[in-house]
Amino acid sequence: MFPYSAYLRVYEPVTAFPEPARTLWTVYADSRRRPRRIHALGSEHRAAARRLTASPPEIVPDRESRDAYVRRSDDMIFVCPWETRLRSWLAFERFRDERSADVAAAFVPPTVAEQAAREFEHWKQSGRSLHPHIQTDVWHVPLAWFVPFARAERCLMLGAPGTGYRRTADALQEHAGHGPATAARARTLIYVTSMGEARRRVADALPVVSGTLGDGAAGAVPLSAGRLEALGRWLGVFHPRALVELDYGGLVHLLDDRTLQSDESVAEMAVALAAMERGEAELAVAMYKRLLARWRPVRALETAN
């Protein structure tokens, strides 16, 4: 059982990486020992659980991960590094910012927290990137994450062979010559698009959302211009020929097959934005209400006992 998290990933062409990383990732992509996509989330989760249940807990791994998600498209290798160390620092920084010192100390001894903070500050001063290839959110999919995608880019697998369907030619194709990831029995719902399309859709949506603030629909519009701006800045960091992937991750375990089949969140977001642009407030509000009706009960499970 995976954590109840969703993931937004960027896969850059291997040629976008400087040497020696380019050669290392090229060799890695052909390795039969690397975690395949269908097992990658499990591998990440087990490693994180071992670190956090240690005594004292290991908040940030000593070394950066050498693993990555891999795709092939048009005979090109695309790589999304796990960057576990950087993501752990960022997650722990957010954890401390959102909780009081006493609560944070109940989970992480102050000496461990201070050491992690010092190491992260050293990383920042080194000038290395603070933009991981993977964003994570728990118990829901942020509404802004639906914007970069189109309905036709969805790929759903319900677990048993023959029950899934794909919306793109290689939506779950992981490695040429090793078969598609859909050969395994796993429930997944993902969207994949090009970086160009993702940036265009976010850029088109931003003035629409910004322009409706204060009008009649704004009170029912939970999509913020700030979140879209942040998403656009993050996408702008990466190679223009990269791929962008939305993965429902462990959230599929909170939704039954019928719910996943009927999930049209991306399409509903697109209709809402188009309606807002045309000034059709009632249609925009109706679409947002459908989105909220689907995701509010899921997010509420975070506080269930």
Image: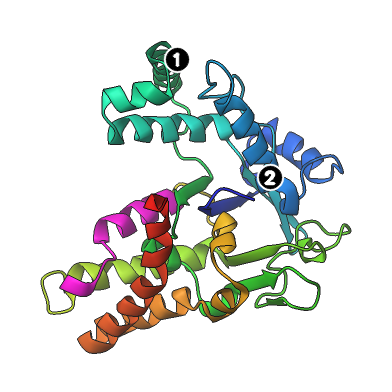
CB under 8 Å between callouts 2 and 1?
no
Magenta residues, dominant SS class: helix
**Total numbered circles:** 2
Q: Which residues are magenta?
A: 219-235
- The x and y percentages for residue 89 are 46, 29
Which is nearer the eye, 25 or 32? 32
- The x and y percentages for residue 162 are 79, 78
| Residue with the mark numbered 2 | 42
Give the CA separation, mark 2 to mark 1. Answer: 26 Å
Residue at image location 71% in from the left, 55% down from the top: 71
- Which element carries disc 1, helix, strand or loop? helix
Q: Amino acid at mark 2?
A: Gly
Question: Can residue 241 be seen?
Answer: no
| Residue with the mark numbered 1 | 112
Question: Can residue 254 be seen?
Answer: yes
Residue at image location 80% in from the left, 61% down from the top: 184
User: In the displayed structure, does residue 300 sit left or right of residue 186?
Assistant: left
- Which element carries disc 2, helix, strand or loop? helix
Which is nearer the eye, 35 or 56? 56
**Compared with residue 7, is residue 17 higher up or lower down, i.e. above or below?**
above
Residue at image location 42% in from the left, 16% down from the top: 109
**Compared with residue 250, is residue 147 higher up or lower down, i.e. above or below?**
below
Badge 1: residue crowd in 10 Å (few <14, some 14–19, many ≥20): some
